[in-house]
Structure formats: C-alpha cells, structure tokens
C-alpha cells in the first residue's frame, strides 16, 4: 500500500478493495475472484491516469513532496558507483543536508552535489529535512573548486524546500554562503548538469542548480518561494497556497515553456514513488545524454552558462 494523497482517494478505495479480495482468496475464504480483481485493477489504473492527466500545480507540489518519493541518496546508490563523500567546510563543521563527493557515472568521473531530505524521522532530523546551512553551501563550493581544478564535470540533484532560516545559520552568513555557492556554480569551467528531483525551493536550490543544463522530473516543482509562503505574503493567508501555486508557474511544464529549464524527465504513472526503477533509468539516461553532448561540444562552459541565464525572460 502507498501513502495516498488527498486527491488520490478514488484510487485508494479501489486498491483497498483489490487487497481485501486478494487477502480473502489467499485464505481460501472466497470463490474465484480473479476476474473481479482484474476488473478493479483496470478501474484503478484508469482512475489514476485520469487524476494525473489533470493535476493542478498545487497537486503537483504535493506529489513533489510525497514522503515515499525517491530522494538524493537513492539516486546516488542507483546511478553512481565508487561514491566517495567529502565532509565539512573547513571552517565550521559538516552539514548532512548537503551530500557531496566524487563518484563514477557510467565509468566517467564526476563531482556530485545533492540535497537529502531523509526518508524517516531519524534520517529527516539528521539531514535537517534537506534544508542546508551555510556550512553545507561552503562544502558544495569546496567540491566545485576541486572539480574545476581536476576538470571533472559537476552533477547536482536538487530537492529542498529552501535553505535553513535559523538564527545560527543567519549568524554564520547564510545569505553570503548561498551567493558564493551560486557564483561558484556560474563560474565553473567544466560542464555542469542539475536535476530537480522533488522540490526546488528558492536560493537554497539555485545555489547548486545554476548549471549548463537544468532538468526537472515531471512532477517536480521549482520556485522562488513555497506556495504557502507566497500566500502568506500576498494574502496573509497560508491556506490560499493552492491559488499561489497556480499563479507562480512552479511546474516543470510551465518552466519549460518559460525557458528556465532545458527538459522534463518523465515519471511513471502515479509519480516517481510508484515506479522507482523506471524514474531512475529515465534520469540516468537524461544525465548521460546531456553529459555526452556537453563534453563533446568542447564549448566555453562558463560563457555558455552566462548567455543561458542572461537570456531568461527575454524571449517570452
């Protein structure tokens, strides 16, 4: 059984009936129910397809935040080999919200930076729900500087509601750390690829996502502020997050149309959590194609990045 979202209730009811029939059949308490199970499975699949064919931006935000959705470390374990993590910013300490190090992607050396939210209470607390502190962004800068020095491409996996806004983080220079990380991203002389796998929240995401190629999973979101935060500012009412999500153009489809991202990675029907292997393969294939194109182009990657971001908003 999955953790169902509010708008998935029709599917939840049907899949509940299917599980109950299968349980009765396994216990020998029912006549042959194979035909009935097949009929309900078809109805369930059709209902899921109808729901996901017409998702609103707010519903996409809920899918992007789904607790069962694969996170950064899941992608690291599946898509990369020989991952060697690097810890600490050489100034204050380590930040587990940012996962970084060097690895091999399909045999090629890459520098890897990602944001990990955690998958249960213990890991969510350890990784601070994916909200990085200044030392996390300074660690990311360390990795980028090493990648530049040794001519290693950089891949980033973005999944954060935003940078951590705590008092301690502000005292240690959160804004400056984000700015320097963004600057380091833009200044890389090596190719860089970023994939938004869940939430891309504000400067906390941009700090590691200003890449030559930026991709989003089909149901991921990318925005300057959360829908709840925008609703609180605009209408002093966080319950109007649904309206804010619609107005903010936070979905992959909207951002591709606005030329802010370079492509959309398809997700299985029902979201990435319903087909983890499929979404991993699609993400790996997209990274592989982009990396191959960038490396073979022998372009000035810093200049290419400059032109890409200066052009945003000029050709609408």
Image (tube, rainbow, N blue to C red):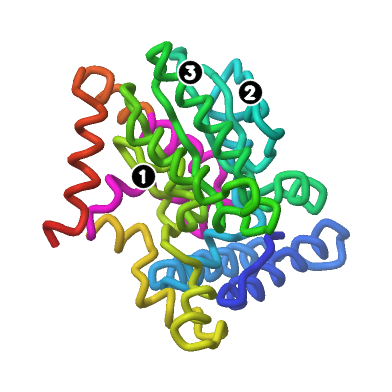
Task: Tell me residue 145's x, y (percent).
Answer: 46, 22
- The secondary structure type at the circle numbered 1 is strand
Residue at position x 47%, y 54% in the image? 200
Q: Residue at x 51, y 17 (%)?
A: 104
Q: Residue at x 40, y 33 (%)?
A: 184
Residues in magenta?
Answer: 258-287
Between 50 and 164, the one nearer to me in the picture:
164
Asked whether disc 1 touches disc 2, contact meaning CB atoms under 8 Å apart, the reply is no
Q: Earlier in the sequence, mark 3 or mark 2?
A: 2
Give whichever of discs 1 and 2 has the lower sequence position. Answer: 2
Residue at the disc numbered 3: 146
86 sits to left or right of 307? right
| Relative vertical location of residue 219 with respect to residue 275 in this rendering, above or below | below
Circle 1 residue = 215
Q: Position of residue 90 (x, y in %)?
A: 65, 26
Q: Quadrant of residue 262?
A: top left
Looking at the rendered image, the quarter that the C terminus falls into is: bottom left
Determine if the magenta segment contains residue 269: yes
Please state if 84 lies on the left or on the right of 244 as rendered. right
Of the image marks 3 and 1, the number of the one nearer the N terminus: 3
Left or right of residue 258, residue 144 in this image: right
Quadrant of the drawing holding the N terminus? bottom right
The residue nearer to you, when weighing 33 against 169, is 169
For this rendering, which residue is in front, 13 or 174?
174
x then y, percent, for residue 140: 53, 33
Along the viewing direction, whichever of 112 and 167 lies nearer the viewer: 167
Which element is circle 3 on?
Answer: helix
The label on residue 86 is 2
At label 2, counting other C-alpha atoms closer than 10 Å, the crowd grade (few under 14, some 14-19, many 20 or more) is some
Q: Please name the residue shown 44% across and 30% down the image.
A: 155
Nearest-to-viewer mark from 1 and 2: 2
């Amino acid at each position: 059984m999955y953790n169902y979202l509010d708008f998935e209730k029709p599917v939840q009811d049907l899949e509940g009936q299917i599980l109950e029939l299968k349980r009765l059949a396994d216990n020998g308490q029912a006549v042959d129910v194979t035909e009935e199970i097949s009929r309900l499975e078809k109805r369930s699949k059709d209902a899921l397809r109808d729901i996901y064919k017409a998702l609103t931006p707010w519903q996409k935000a809920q899918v992007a935040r789904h607790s069962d959705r694969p996170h950064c470390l899941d992608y690291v374990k599946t898509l990369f080999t020989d991952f060697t993590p690097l810890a600490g910013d050489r100034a204050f300490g380590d930040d587990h919200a940012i996962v970084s190090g060097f690895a091999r992607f399909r045999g090629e050396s890459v520098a890897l930076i990602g944001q990990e939210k955690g998958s249960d209470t213990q890991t969510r607390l350890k990784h601070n729900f994916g909200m990085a502190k200044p030392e996390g962004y300074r660690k990311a800068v360390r990795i980028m500087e090493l990648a530049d020095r040794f001519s290693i491409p950089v891949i980033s996996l973005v999944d954060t509601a935003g940078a951590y806004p705590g008092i301690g983080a502000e005292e240690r220079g959160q804004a400056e750390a984000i700015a320097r990380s963004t600057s380091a991203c833009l200044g890389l002389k090596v190719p860089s690829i970023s994939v938004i796998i869940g939430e891309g929240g504000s400067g906390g995401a941009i700090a590691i996502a200003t890449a030559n190629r930026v991709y989003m999973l089909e149901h991921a979101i990318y925005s300057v502020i959360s829908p709840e935060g925008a609703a609180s500012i605009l209408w002093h009412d966080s319950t109007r997050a649904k309206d804010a999500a619609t107005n903010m153009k936070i979905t992959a489809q909207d951002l591709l149309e606005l030329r802010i991202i370079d492509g959309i990675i398809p997700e299985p029907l029902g979201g990435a959590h319903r087909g983890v292997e499929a979404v991993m393969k699609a993400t790996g294939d997209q990274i592989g194609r982009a990396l191959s194109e960038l490396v073979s182009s022998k372009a000035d990657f810093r200049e290419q990045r400059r032109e890409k971001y200066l052009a945003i908003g000029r050709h609408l």
